[in-house]
Image (tube, coloured by chain):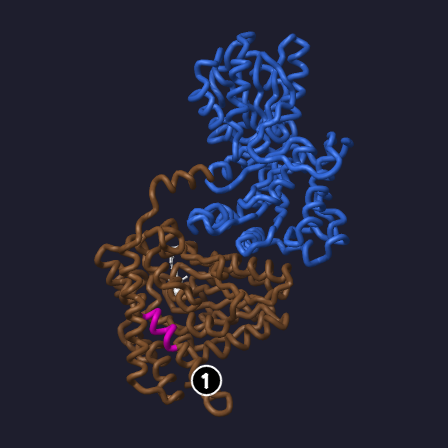
Amino acid sequence: MSASAKGANAPSRELLEKLFRTAYKIRVFESEGIKLYRQGLIRGYFHPYLGQEGIATGVCAALKEGDYIASTHRGHGHCIAWGADVKRMVAELLQKETGYCRGYGGSMHIADISQGNLGANGIVGAGTPLGVGAALANQIRGSDAVTVTFSSDGGANNGTFLESLNLAAIWNLAFVLVVENNHYAVSTRIEESTRDTDLYKRGLAIGVESHQVDGNDPLAVYHLMKDAARKCREGKGPILIEAKTFRHMGHHVNDPGKYMPSEELAAWKAKDPVDRARAALTEMSGIEISQIEAIEQEIRKEFDDAVEFSRNSREITIEEFQQFIAAY
Amino acid sequence: MTREIMYRDALREAIDEEMANNPLVFIIGEGIAERGGSYKVTEGLLAKYGSKRVRDTPIAEAGMIGVGVGAAIAGARPIVEILYVDFAMLGMDMLVNQAAKFRLMTGGSGRVPFIMRTQGGTGGGVAAQHSQSLEALFYHIPGLKVVMPSQPADAKGLLKYALRQEDPVIFLEHKHLYMTKGPVPEGEYVIEFGKADIKRPGKDVTIIAWSNMVPRALEAAAKLAEEGIEAEVLDPRTLVPLDKEAILASVAKTNRVVIVQEAVRRGGVASDICSIIQEEAFYSLDAPVEIVAGLNIPVPFNLELEKASVPQVPDIISAARRTLHLQPRAIAAQ
Ligand SMILES: Cc1ncc(C[n+]2csc(CCOP(=O)(O)OP(=O)(O)O)c2C)c(N)n1
Ligand SMILES: [Mg+2]
C-alpha cells in the first residue's frame, strides 16, 4: 500500500471494491480463456494479460464515460477494465455472431466505438497515433474527453511513438500514453532493445510530463491516472506513464516462456496485482472474507454464463459475408 | 453557370465549402496553414477557419497519417495532406493495416472517414523519390478508395463527395495539373465515386486514361482525328470503385482499347483493367488490348530520360493505330 493511500485521502470502499472486481474479472477471463483455448474452442493468437491486471484496472477506474481508450495485441484486460460485456468478448473469441466484431476480428481486434474503445491492435505500437487522433478529434469537437493509449515496451520502439506523442505535445492534447513495461517483447529483454530501460524518460526528452509507477499496484496506478486525467482536462496534456510490470507466463498461450528467469518471475508473482487489490480491499475497507468470496463467485459465474451464451450463439453466415464483400 | 478555374482552386473550394458545412472537417499537413501549402490548395483556410482546424505538422508522415486515421475512427473528418505520394510510404501501416481493415475487423461497426490528399507523377524534374505514380499500391488494398481526378470540376466534386462518405480515401492529385484550368459549375455539387466520365466521345477506339494521362490522351485523340480516327477518351476518375460498366459499354461500341497509365507497367492498374476487359468483353475485341505505361524503372532526373520513362502523346497515337491494324504490333512491353 502506498503511504498516500492512507490517512485523510483514504480510498473509498466503493473504489477498492471496484479495483478488486476488475482485476479479478480479468484474472478469471484470462485463466479460463486459456482453458478454452487448450480445448480448441479458441483459435489464433491469445496474448494473456495475466500479471499486468493492475494497470488496466487502475487506469480505467480513473476515467469517465465519454473518454476513449486504444489498446494492444494483449488487450483483453483493457476491454474488461473499460467495462466491456464479457459475453460479447467470449463470443468474439469463439468467432460467434454475437461477439463485439461478429467474429470478423477476434482477440486482437476487439473494439467498441460506441463506447469509446478504439480497439485492440495486431500491429505493435499502432494504438499510439490512433489514440492521439481520437484526442485531436475531441479537441476539435470541444469535448473535454481524455484518450488513453495502452502501449508497451515493444511499442515504445516503433517510430510512431515519438511522432505521435510529439504531435500530442505541440497541440496540448488530452492524451495519456500508458507504457506497460513488462520487460519483454516476446523473448527479447528490454535491456537488449534499449540503453535506458526507464522508458518514461522518452517523454521528458520532448517536453511531455512523464511518470513511472509500479504497475502491479492498482491503487497507485489509479491515483496517478486520476491526476493525469485531471491535468489533461485542464489543457495540460499530454502525459506519459510508464508502468513497470511482468507477465506471469510466456508471450502467448503456446509460448512456454522458458527464457523468463524463475527467480525473477517468482519475485513479480509475489507482487501479484490481483492479490494486492484483494489485500487493499480487505485491509482498508473492513469487508468480510465471505463478501469477497461472494464477489469472486459472482464473477466466475458471469464468465461461465458468457461461455454458455457464446456456445449457444450462431456464427456469421456466408450470405451475410456476401453483403460485406459487396461493400468492399 | 460555370467558370474557368484552376485545379488547385477547385480543390480549395471543395475543402472550403465542406469546412463551412461541417465543423468536424479539418486539415493537417506540412506548411498548409500560414503558407497555404506547396501547391496553394489551402491558401486562406487558416484565416477563415482558425488554427484548430487548419494545422501545420512536423515532418512525421506516419504520425500524421495515423493521427488522421484515429481522428476519423473517433468520428471527425480529417484531411491529411502529404506533400508527395512518395512520402506516404512512411505511413503505409496506418493506411494498409489500420484504415483499410477497420471496417471489416469490427464487423462493420467501425468506419474510417479519412482522406489522404497527396500528389504524384513526373514533370517537375524532381527525380526518382518525388516523381512516382503509386496508385497500384493503394488499388491493391481492399478497403481503400482510390480517386485520381484529371480536371478541376472532377477534383472539386470528388473531394466534396469524399468528405461526405464513410471510408478511407486516397485522393491522388497530379503535380502537373494544379495550374491547369477547366470549367467548374457554380455552387454546390458532388461527384459520386465509381462513375467514369467520357472526356471525348468516339467510335473507333477507347482510350482509358486517368490523372495527367487524360490531357495526353485528349491530345492524342485530337491528332488521331486529323487522320480520321475517332478515339473515345474514358476517364474512370476513381480507380476504386471502378466503373466497369462504363468501360465495358465503351469497348462494346469501339471494339478496341488502349489503356494509358503513367505508373510503371509491372503490376499496374492498367493490367488489371485489361484482365477485366479480356474476361468480360473478349468477344467484342477486334484487336489485342494495348497498354501504354511507364517503364519498369525509377524515374531519372535528366529531362529527356524522364520523358522517355512515361507515356507521351506519340506513344498513345501509335498504340491506337496498332489497335486499328494501321501499324505493326509492338513485340512486347518493356
Ligand atoms: C509491427 C509489429 N511487429 C512485430 C509484431 C509481432 N509481435 C507481436 S507481439 C510482439 C511483442 C510485443 O512486445 P511488447 O510490445 O513489449 O508487448 P507485450 O507482448 O510485452 O505486451 C511482437 C514482436 C507485430 N505484431 N507488429
Ligand atoms: Mg513487453
The chain whose colour is blue is: B
Secondary structure, mark 1, is: loop
**Quadrant of the snapshot with the N terminus of chain B:** top right
Q: Where is residue A288 in the image (x, y as percent from the top left)?
A: 32, 87
Is residue B125 visible in the rendered structure shown here? no
Q: Residue at x 53, y 54 (%)?
A: B73
Instruction: For label 1, count other residues whose C-alpha is less than 10 Å away and answer few (under 14), some (14-19) or many (20+).
Output: few
| Dominant secondary-structure state across the stretch colored magenta | helix
Left or right: A308 with respect to A204?
Answer: left
Q: Residue furthest bottom?
A: A7
Q: Where is residue A143 in the image (x, y as percent from the top left)?
A: 61, 64
Q: Residue at x 53, y 68 (%)?
A: A176
Left or right: A247 with respect to B69?
Answer: left
Q: What stretch is highlighted in magenta?
A: A20-27
Q: Where is residue A61 in the image (x, y as percent from the top left)?
A: 46, 74
Q: How many marks?
A: 1
The chain whose colour is brown is: A
**Residue highlighted by disc 1:** A12
Q: Is residue B34 magenta?
A: no
View quadrant of ligand 2: bottom left
Q: Who is closer to the viewer here, A29 or B297?
A: A29
